[in-house]
Amino acid sequence: MTSRPRTPRTFQLGVLVAGVALFAILVRSVGLERLVADLRGFGFAIVGVVAYELIIDAVNTVAWRKTLPPGAPVGFWLLFWVRQAGVAVNQLTPTVTVGGEVVKTLLLRPRLPTAATAASLVAARMSYALGQAFLVLLGFSAMLGRMRHAPDLTTAIVLAFLITVGGVLGFVWLQRRGIFATVIASARRLGIGGGFVERIQADGAAIDAHLADFYRDRPKAFGASVLWHVVGQLVGLIQLSFILTALGVPTPLVTCLAIEAFALVLDWAGFWVPGRIGAQEAGRVLVFTTFGLSAATGLAVALIMRLNQLAVAALGLAAFASLSLTQPSRAASPPER
């Protein structure tokens, strides 16, 4: 019996190793002693960074709540901790955001139909991407004037932004049309069928129905979700300003806006790297040096955000354990649509 090839897993492992190697090169280039000194000087300011992150998460929870069915029996705090549990799984496992969405769906299953939760997560993901795109658009006004010396890089960033926004808008259009029905029809045209396609067809049709109803009947709710995500991005901007000030490098908000916009585009490009290890750090170094700050500051900020992510992920894992033990019996789960 021959084993199936594990190309995706091998690719992920190779990318992870490359990311770790890139991170080691960056640390060596900046200097370990300087990096440790910067982090030691930052000290207890990490508490403020985590506090800002929790505010961002609360704002994004409100944005997600806007996409849930009206009257859904899910309070803010329950949704907040469910979201934290899902984010922790996304950050600590190489599932490229899929694992966290599954966790959120399972934790809400006793209170909401699976299709309704899944549809809300898809809509919230799109509103989050559009909120990020809006911040990037704002950042371009601050970025382009400062990058006249690097026209090729500017062109690449603008092109990446346009492709990403086009992809997001195209995906929203596809959701309105029936994304799962379209995917299943395409699979069958390609001769892909079998039990798996049959199993997901019914669930996909239910999710498509929820998404179609949401975009048709509640466009204002989607717009409000996008707006709340924009607010979350702006709080992230203040968080970056706080970090730079605590590092002894006070930076104007307009420069922070340009840095955040540039960093978001690079994060979009590196989403396929597990945990963005190495890619996130290299991206921050590139961004900071582009805007006249030091590579050491960029790497220090990247590592502070890593520590912030680990702290918030720890809270998320605790929430996951607590919710898994205390959630109602699935027997009481509402029927699927």
Image (tube, rainbow, N blue to C red):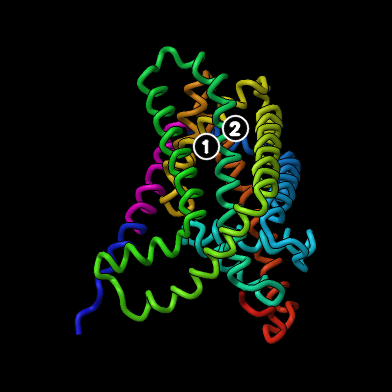
Give the position of the C terminus as an image quadrant.
bottom right
Q: Amino acid at mark 1?
A: Leu
| Left or right: where 5 falls relative to 246 | left
Locate the N terminus and report the quarter of the image it occupies: bottom left
Q: Residue at x 73, y 58 (%)?
A: 80
- Mark 2 = which residue? 135
Instruction: Assess whether mark 2 and mark 1 are in contact (beta carbons under 8 angstroms).
Output: yes
The residue singled out by tag 1 in the image is 264
Mark yes or no: residue 258 visible. Answer: yes
Q: Marks 1/2: CA distance? A: 9 Å
**Region rendered in magenta:** 13-30
Does 6 appear in magenta? no
Vertically, is 162 above or below 121? Answer: above
The answer to which quarter of the image holds residue 227 is: top right
- Up-down: is 330 above or below 309? below
Q: In the rendered view, tell whether residue 45 sits above or below residue 286.
A: below
Q: Is residue 278 visible?
A: no
